[in-house]
Amino acid sequence: MTATNSFLPPEPVVVQPRQRPVIAIDGPAGAGKSTLAAHLARTFGFLNLETGAMYRALALKAIENDYGFDEEESLLDLAAKTRIKLEPQHEGNCVTLDGMDVSRRIRDKDVTSGASQISVHPRLRAWMVDEQRALGQAGGVVMEGRDIGTAVFPDAEVKIFLDAAPEVRGNRRYQQNPGTPGQSNVTESALVEEMRERDARDRNRIESPLKPASDAVILDSTNLSLEQVLAAAEEIVRQHLPTPK
Ligand code: DC
C-alpha cells in the first residue's frame, strides 16, 4: 500500500532525525480524538493525520473485493496493490482509495467493524506502522490512532491518551451522527454495544493492543465539556513543547 500525504516530499525519503515534534493522540472509539487532533493541529500549525482512516480504507477495499477480514495473507497482498492517501483538512482528513474520495463511505458500519477486525493481524499492523512512520517522519504532525504513542512513535514529544466512559462515548457519537448513512436505524444502545465490542477487540488483540503508553498523559473526558477537553489538551501540549507556536 502506498499511503501518501501531499504535503510530504516524494519518495524515496531520506530518513533523518525529525526537525519538528510529534503529538500522539490515542484512545478508544468515540472519545473525541479526531476533534481534538484537528484542534491541536490548527492551534500549533501541525498536520493532522488520522491513522484509523488507513485501516478503514483497506477494510473498504477488502469488502469491495470480497476478501475475508480474517485472511491476513490475502489482505497483505491487497495492501501492496492499494493506494491510500490522507489529506489533512480543516476538520479531519480527506481520504482517497486508489484515487477515489472515500471520506464518507469509510464511516459506514460495515467498514467500521471491518477496520477493527483487520487491525488484529500483526503483519498488517507492521505494514501500517511503517507507512505511518514514513508519513510522520518529518514531524510537525498530530497523529491520531490506537498505537501511536506505544508503537508508531514511542519517542513522540507529546502523548495524550483520551478516554471516556463507554456510555458517554456512545451518546456523543449518537448525538453527532443520528442520521449518518449506514447508521440511520441505529439506536443509542446498539451504538454503545457496538462500541463495547470494538473496544474489547482493540484492547485485547495480541499485537499493539489499545493501552496508554507508560509516559502518556491520560485525559478522561467523561465529565468534561468539549471546550474543557480542548483547553486541557492545549495545556498538556504547551507543557511538553519547548517553543509552541
Ligand atoms: O480511529 P478509528 O475508529 O477510525 O479506527 C478504526 C479501527 O482501526 C479501530 O477499531 C482500530 C483500528 N486502528 C488501529 O488498530 N490502530 C490505529 N492506529 C488506528 C486505528
Image (cartoon, rainbow, N blue to C red):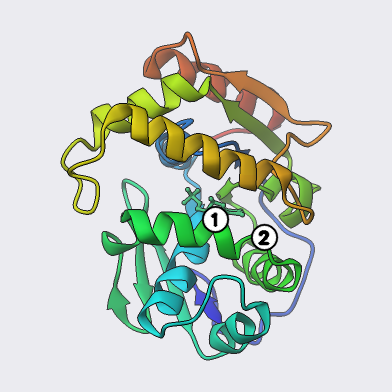
Q: Position of residue 113 (x, y in %)?
A: 46, 55
- Between 238 and 180, which is closer to the camera in this rendering? 180
Residue lying at the far top of the rendered structure: 223
**Amino acid at pointer 2:** Val
Instruction: Check residue 120 in the rendering and tell me which mark sits there, or answer none.
Output: 2
**Is residue 72 visible to the viewer in this orientation of the structure?**
yes
Dot 1 alpha-carbon crowd within 10 angstroms: few under 14, some 14 to 19, many 20 or more:
some
Q: Residue at x 15, y 41 (%)?
A: 179
Q: Residue at x 43, y 73 (%)?
A: 85
- Cβ of mark 1 under 8 Å from ligand 1: the answer is yes
Q: Position of residue 151 (x, y in %)?
A: 77, 53
Residue behind mark 1: 116
Residue lying at the far right of the rendered structure: 214
Say what secondary structure mark 1 lies in: helix
Gap in angstroms between the C-alphas marked 2 and 1? 7 Å
State whether residue 95 is above or below residue 240. Answer: below
Q: Residue at x 66, y 51 (%)?
A: 20
State whether residue 55 is above or below residue 13. Answer: above
Q: Position of residue 32 (x, y in %)?
A: 44, 32
Q: Residue at x 39, y 28 (%)?
A: 170
Dot 2 alpha-carbon crowd within 10 angstroms: few under 14, some 14 to 19, many 20 or more:
many
Number of numbered discs? 2
- 2 and 1 marks in contact (CB < 8 Å): yes
Quarter of the figure with the N terminus: bottom right
User: In the figure, residue 111 lies in which quadrant?
Assistant: bottom left
